[in-house]
């Protein structure tokens, strides 16, 4: 029993740090670079990915014994596309402003490697419970890193966090942080920092 | 033959059944939320038009009007008539689009009831460069259009932004985006006016 609990907590923490989709696996780079101009779109994207990841992992895990090897990718894509469409409709109906800001990046979750990777590596081989824990862990890991990136960029580009001014009055905003170059530099520095930490640890 | 059919069904039944269930799920969700989505779009357009022509009711008078964008491209535009509280025509609003620096720029343009003066524009959607092209949403650029003649507009690089005439001063560092906005005006004003006259709607406004 203790071993099983240990196994589950391992599955959960894998997504947070050891196998973090962005920091360790470098998956889902497209939304990571594109929607992290501020915390709010980053958080919305993260929550949408958690929803899609959770639903697709549940569906794939439930039908894993029925899957034919050569049709499995097709089945994964079908399930993922359905939940992404639902998430997209939800945002259009209840968060129209965020939906406009995120634009095509919500529908693009369909081709996000994190989701298909978890379906293939975890949900198609494990039971429902493990798949759910894996989806939550990976989803939170993805969302937290997106929010950190979004936070740094929003702070340096506008001097605000969640649209609330937090910097001193004479602070000069760096417009470049809102542009793609800001995303690449911030992500590069964070990846470097993470590599430094892990190298020192080992 | 029968064996082949059975084999085919054995392999693909899950895919067929899942596609049906997932399709149904999307159809149900869409049916439930589509009215809200449509309502959001109308509310957004309404608030944009209200910001251009205050205290007026908007009525769709011509829909899907084809507008030539040049280079063989055409777009469709909806024309709204604004009616003031006293029942008189307060002007016209129409959707307009054109190519920006990075992506399509979509505007809502308002003109007065005689189609002689521009009442302003709002940006419905744009994806211009942050800090440069995206300044087309800012008042200092938009205000140059308010009160400008609804005729051919010219873009210049230097001048007085506060002077209202047919000269529009470009946003420094964003000539492409500024040109795009002016081109949209020049493209649409003439064609929409012609359409309104052809349909006899402009005479009504006088």
Image (cartoon, rainbow, N blue to C red):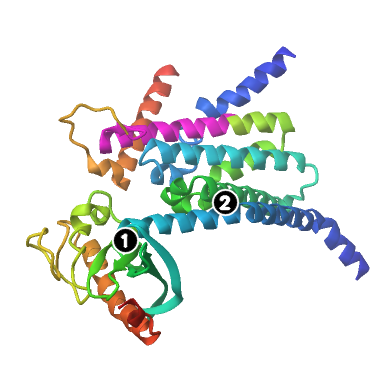
Q: Chain of mark 2?
A: A
Q: Is residue A192 above or below residue A37?
A: above
**Which residue carries the number 2 mark?**
A89
Per the rendered image, the range of residues in magenta is A137-163
Q: Position of residue A166 (x, y in %)?
A: 28, 27
Quadrant of residue B54 in the image? bottom left
Marks counted in the figure total 2
Q: Position of residue A124 (x, y in %)?
A: 71, 40
Disc 1 secondary structure class: loop
Quadrant of residue A42 in the image? top left
Residue shown at 39%/31% (left/top)? A148
Q: Position of residue A35 (x, y in %)?
A: 41, 44
Q: Nearer the viewer, residue A154 or B181?
A: B181
How many other residues sit within 10 Å of disc 2, few (<14), some (14-19) or many (≥20)? many
Q: Chain of mark 1?
A: B
Q: Nearer the viewer, residue A36 or A88?
A: A88
Q: Nearer the viewer, residue B106 or A69?
A: B106
Residue shown at 62%/20% (left/top)? A9
Spatial separation of the CA atoms under disc 2 and disc 1: 31 Å
The answer to whether mark 2 and mark 1 are in CB contact below 8 A is no
Q: Position of residue B49 (x, y in %)?
A: 36, 60
Left or right? Give the position of B185 relative to A133: left
**Which residue carries the number 1 mark?**
B53
The answer, for residue B126, to whether it is visible in the render is: no
Q: Is residue B41 above or below residue A146?
A: below
Residue shown at 7%/62% (left/top)? B158
Which quarter shows the N terminus of chain A?
Answer: top right
Query: Most prominent secondary structure in the magenta stretch?
Result: helix
Q: Nearer the viewer, residue A3 or A101?
A: A101
The question of residue A152 being in magenta is answered with: yes
């Amino acid at each position: 029993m203790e071993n099983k609990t240990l196994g589950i907590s391992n599955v959960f923490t894998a997504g947070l740090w050891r196998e973090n989709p962005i920091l360790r696996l470098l998956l889902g780079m497209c939304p990571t670079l594109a929607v992290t101009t501020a915390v709010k779109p980053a958080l919305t994207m993260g929550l949408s990915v958690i929803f899609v990841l959770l639903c697709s992992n549940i569906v794939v895990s439930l039908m894993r014994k029925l899957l034919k090897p050569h049709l499995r990718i097709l089945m994964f894509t079908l399930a993922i596309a359905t939940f992404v469409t639902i998430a997209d409709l939800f945002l259009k109906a209840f968060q129209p402003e965020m939906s406009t800001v995120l634009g095509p990046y919500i529908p693009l979750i369909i081709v996000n490697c994190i989701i298909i990777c978890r379906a293939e590596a975890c949900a198609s081989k494990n039971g429902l419970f493990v798949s759910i824990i894996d989806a939550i862990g990976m989803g939170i890991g993805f969302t937290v890193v997106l929010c950190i990136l979004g936070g740094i960029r929003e702070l340096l580009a506008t001097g605000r966090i969640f649209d609330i001014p937090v910097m001193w009055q004479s602070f000069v905003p760096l417009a470049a942080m809102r542009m793609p170059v800001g995303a690449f530099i911030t992500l590069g520095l964070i990846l470097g920092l993470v590599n430094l930490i892990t190298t020192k640890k080992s | 033959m029968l064996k082949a059919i059975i084999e085919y069904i054995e392999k693909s039944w899950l895919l067929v059944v899942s596609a049906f269930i997932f399709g149904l799920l999307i159809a149900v969700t869409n049916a439930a939320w589509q009215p809200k989505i449509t309502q959001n779009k109308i509310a957004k357009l309404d608030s944009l038009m209200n910001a251009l022509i205050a205290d007026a009711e908007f009525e769709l008078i011509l829909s899907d009007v084809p507008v030539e964008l040049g280079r063989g491209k055409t777009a469709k535009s909806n024309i709204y008539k604004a009616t003031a509280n006293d029942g008189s025509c307060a002007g016209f609003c129409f959707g307009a689009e054109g190519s920006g620096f990075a992506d399509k720029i979509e505007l809502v343009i308002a003109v007065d009831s005689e189609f002689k003066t521009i009442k302003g524009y709002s940006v419905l959607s744009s994806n211009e460069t942050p800090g440069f092209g995206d300044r087309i949403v800012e008042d200092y650029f938009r205000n140059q259009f308010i009160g400008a003649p609804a005729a051919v507009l010219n873009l210049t690089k230097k001048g007085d932004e506060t002077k209202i005439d047919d000269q529009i001063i470009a946003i420094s560092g964003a000539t492409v985006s500024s040109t795009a906005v002016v081109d949209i005006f020049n493209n649409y004003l003439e064609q929409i006016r012609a359409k309104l006259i052809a349909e006899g709607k402009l005479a009504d406004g006088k």
